[in-house]
Image (cartoon, grey):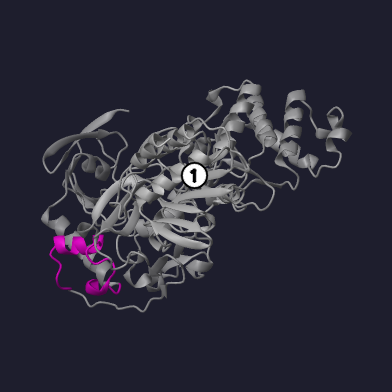
Amino acid sequence: MSTVKFTVDGEKISAEKGETVMSACKKHGIDIPKLCQHDAMENVMACRVCIVEVNGEQIQPACGLKVEEDLEIKTETDEIKKYRRMNLELIYRSENHYCMFCESDGDCELQDLMWENGIDYFEHPRLFPDRPIDSSHEHIVIDNNRCIRCGRCVRACEEVVGNQTLAFGGRGLENEIVADADVPLKESTCVSCGMCLQVCPTGAIFNKHSMFKGIKDECDLTESTCLRCSVGCETEIYTRTGHLVEIEGAESEMESGGQLCEMGRFEPLVDRTEKIDDVIYKENETEKEMSLAKGLEKAAEVLDEGDKISAMASGNLTNEVLDSFSEAMRTHGALFDVVGAKRHRFEKEVKRRINMIEGHFIDDITEVMKADHILLYDTSVRDTHPVLASYIRRAAMNGTRLITIDAYEDRFWEHSDISISVESPKTQLTRLINQVVREGKGSIEDLTRVSSILGGLRVHPRDVMQVVKHLEESTYDIIILGSEIIDRWSIRHIFELAKLEGSYLISLNQASNQYIRSLETEGVYEEPDVAYVLAGDEDDQEDMKKLIENADFSIVQASKRSELTEKADLVIPSLTMFEREGTSVNINGEEKEVERVMEPKGELKSEREFFEELAEKR
């Protein structure tokens, strides 16, 4: 892209042609005040705080002004300061801003600009409107009394999250933020991602669980990676005196806009599950506490006595913990598995059988926003991988055709062009699609042996032909498999369809850490003598529960009490996700850093060292 040179306050700088003055100045360390502008969203030039003087003649907002060759910009003339001060005063006086009583006192962009511009009195009377406060939502409060109508939350909801829940309602002085058709936020289509409160420049939208716990400048900041799903969002975690205060998405991640989901932003703040600090040994229906050293000895003793040993780890752990646990278990002769790895093993087998190359697999999930068609199997992606779901919604809003196939409900019904409900296994529908494509037929009735194919199946021919028609029209289509698709025949037929049509694939499994793709796993004994489970922070623990229920003796290593620890014979403490450090691999195959946020509080300081010592006791 070509570059142009222009002048800002007498300094000659360069920028890409078509770039805004504000963006160019930011890259060169020149600060221009703003309120409505945000890098993740389109500029609307609403607040007029970023005004600059252009060529000594005009006054224009820098967020909407494109750079041109030899442009002369001044950011701090007397006239600019006068207009900027007037705009700020009008913004402030129109609402009920009481800084000392506001949750965002000290973390407010409007407050900062008021101080910077020396505004400590008002030339015009304040309005003091009486506006509603919506505190119905589990995590989010909307206080329209502190809203400056910048529109950041509305644009973030639409442009970044692709959800369109928030909007402006009312006219003139009655104008305010509303959810859907002016219903309480709790009853709206809100997906609880919290992006609105992250971009709010005042205290108009805030986090219930973080309020009055401390301003960000007083907190410790740790940049890390979220391990709640395989998207692996980058996070900024604020702590104070060893306690979580707030979790935000890293806004440097421009494609995601810095968004997180409810699992990553809010759930860690509301988790009150009892932490496990001591080893618990259950004998004759009584619990006995013992030291970590004694627990290690007991675990080694039980493992040495076992014949059939099964070991299963959470897929939400770091690479280093998975490696050390795997090595310790294999040293003791155990079969080893990770939650989510079974699906990966099926895929490896299918790819080998149909001779499928890796080039069919997407290595950047943001590619979904460029697809002509998206064929989505299993719409639970909305709940299991919410940030990926936002990319799917954004794609559909921008013209991508979305075809959803689910046995239960279509969680993307507002955005689906074709929604297919298949009560019988998805493999049957896909098998028919493949045969139509392979034989080049114009209708399903033209297939050979059609009567035997359709016998007893609840697959409508119209659905088959709709999918075929759209895939044949497309030049760039992406097939997404949700994590609830676990049978090998569905996987095989979907992969065959991708190969036939030259489509690209995104395959999701239960594990957040895709290191499982390179980790050796083989499944476990279903009814072992000893089961050793290393749990993570996930809620879905069905595979682990089933394993320990079928074992003669079960060991559960976990950071917090759960159904698993209640059923276990020996409970050993582990670290929480905020006490761990190491690396993790996301769905794109990128290795991400997982930083320690808080120091471990119990006896256990390192899981790797614990497992290394356990291996030595063989």
Vertical side of 319 occupied by 193: above or below:
below
Image x and y of residue 315, in percent: 48, 42
**The magenta stretch spans residue 551:** no
Residue 266 vertical position relative to residue 93 in the rendered view, above or below: above
The type of residue carrying mark 1 is Val
Residue 559 in sight in this render: yes
Q: Residues within 10 Å of mark 1 (few under 14, many from 20)?
A: some
Q: Nearer the viewer, residue 396 or 4?
A: 396
Residue 575 visible in this rendered orientation of the protein:
no
Span colored in magenta:
95-122
Q: Quadrant of residue 196?
A: bottom left
Which residue occupies 63% across, 43% down?
Answer: 527
Q: Is residue 240 left or right of residue 56?
A: right
Q: Say which residue label 1 marks.
A: 302
Main SS, magenta residues: loop
200, 83: nearer the viewer: 200
Q: Is residue 93 above or below residue 443?
A: below
Q: Residue 447 at x, y = what percent?
A: 83, 29
Dividing the image into 4 quarters, which one contains the N terminus?
top left
Please provide percent x and percent y for residue 234. 36, 44
Quarter location, residue 602:
bottom left
* Residue found at the far top of this picture: 355
Is 492 placed left or right of 183 in the picture? right
Residue 249: percent from the left, percent from the top? 36, 50
Q: Nearer the viewer, residue 163 or 175?
A: 163
Quadrant of the drawing holding the C terminus: top left
97 is within the stretch colored magenta: yes
Q: Residue at x 86, y 39 (%)?
A: 455
Q: Quadrant of residue 36?
A: bottom left
Q: Secondary structure at mark 1?
A: helix
